[in-house]
Image (tube, grey):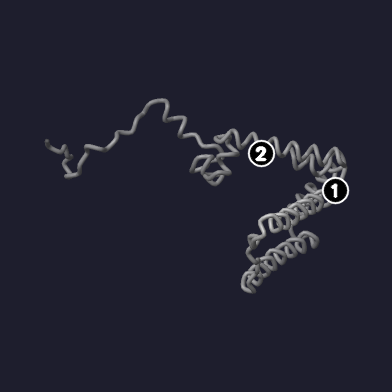
C-alpha cells in the first residue's frame, strides 16, 4: 500500500480539506469579537458548565437554593449578619453534641481536626496585595475628587446616583438575587 504524497514530500493521507458549506459560517460569528467560545470565556470548567446549563440538574439546584435563600431573607426581615451567625451557631452546637456523643458512645478517641495555622509569609503577602489595591483606590478617589478627570467624575456620580435610586426601591438581597 503506497502513501499518497504531494510534490513537497508531505503525507496527505490524514489531511482534511476545509469545507465551504453554510454550517461553517455560523462558527465564524463571535459575540463581542471573542476569539474563543463562550464556554472558554467563562473559564471552561464546572462553573461554566453550570452557567451555560450543560449540567442542568446542578444549575436548577443553584436557582432553587438561591430562591430559598432570597425568600428566607425577605420573609424574615433579619439582617444577613444575624442569619449567618445563627446558622454558624447551630452548626457549632450540632458538631459539639455529635463529637461528645460519639466519644461517650464509642468510648474511643474522637477524630481530631487538623490545626489551622496561617504562616507569616501568607499574611504578609495578603496584606501587601491588599495595601496595593487600597492605595490604587485611594489614588482614583483623589483624582475624582480633585476633578482631574471630569468624565470619570461624571461616571462615578451617575453610577452612585443610580445605585441610590435603585436601592430606595428594592433591598440588597432582591438586587443580588436578580
Q: In the rendering, at what x and y percent does residue 78 appear?
A: 87, 45
From the viewer's perspective, tell me whether residue 168 is left or right of residue 51: right
Compared across the picture, whether 90 is left or right of 129 comes to right
| Between discs 2 and 1, the one toward the N terminus | 2
Vertical arrangement, residue 128 with respect to residue 97, above or below: below
Q: Residue at x 51, y 44 (%)?
A: 40
Q: Residue at x 22, y 38 (%)?
A: 12
Q: Is residue 76 left or right of residue 109?
A: right
On the image, the x and y values in percent for residue 75 come to: 85, 38
Identify residue for label 1. Answer: 79
Most extreme residue toward the left is 1
Q: Is 121 situated above or below 150?
A: below
Query: Viewer-proximal residue, 89 or 152?
Result: 89
Q: How many other residues sit within 10 Å of disc 2, few (<14), some (14-19) or many (≥20)?
A: some
Residue 62: assigned label? 2
Along the line of sight, the residue nearer the viewer: 161 or 95: 95
Amino acid at each position: 500500500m503506497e502513501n499518497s504524497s504531494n510534490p513537497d514530500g508531505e503525507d496527505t493521507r490524514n489531511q482534511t480539506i476545509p469545507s465551504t458549506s453554510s454550517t461553517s459560517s455560523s462558527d465564524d460569528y463571535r459575540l463581542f469579537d471573542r476569539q474563543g467560545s463562550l464556554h472558554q470565556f467563562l473559564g471552561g470548567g464546572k462553573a461554566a458548565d453550570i452557567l451555560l446549563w450543560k449540567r442542568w440538574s446542578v444549575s436548577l439546584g443553584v436557582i432553587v437554593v438561591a430562591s430559598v435563600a432570597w425568600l428566607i431573607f425577605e420573609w424574615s426581615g433579619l439582617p444577613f449578619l444575624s442569619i449567618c451567625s445563627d446558622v454558624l451557631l447551630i452548626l457549632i452546637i450540632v458538631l459539639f453534641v455529635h463529637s461528645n456523643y460519639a466519644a461517650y458512645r464509642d468510648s474511643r478517641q474522637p477524630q481530631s481536626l487538623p490545626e489551622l495555622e496561617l504562616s507569616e509569609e501568607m499574611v504578609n503577602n495578603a496584606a501587601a496585595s491588599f495595601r496595593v489595591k487600597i492605595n490604587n483606590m485611594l489614588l482614583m478617589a483623589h483624582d475624582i475628587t480633585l476633578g482631574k478627570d471630569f468624565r470619570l467624575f461624571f461616571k462615578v456620580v451617575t453610577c452612585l446616583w443610580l445605585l441610590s435610586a435603585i436601592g430606595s426601591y428594592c433591598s440588597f438581597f432582591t438586587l443580588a438575587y436578580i
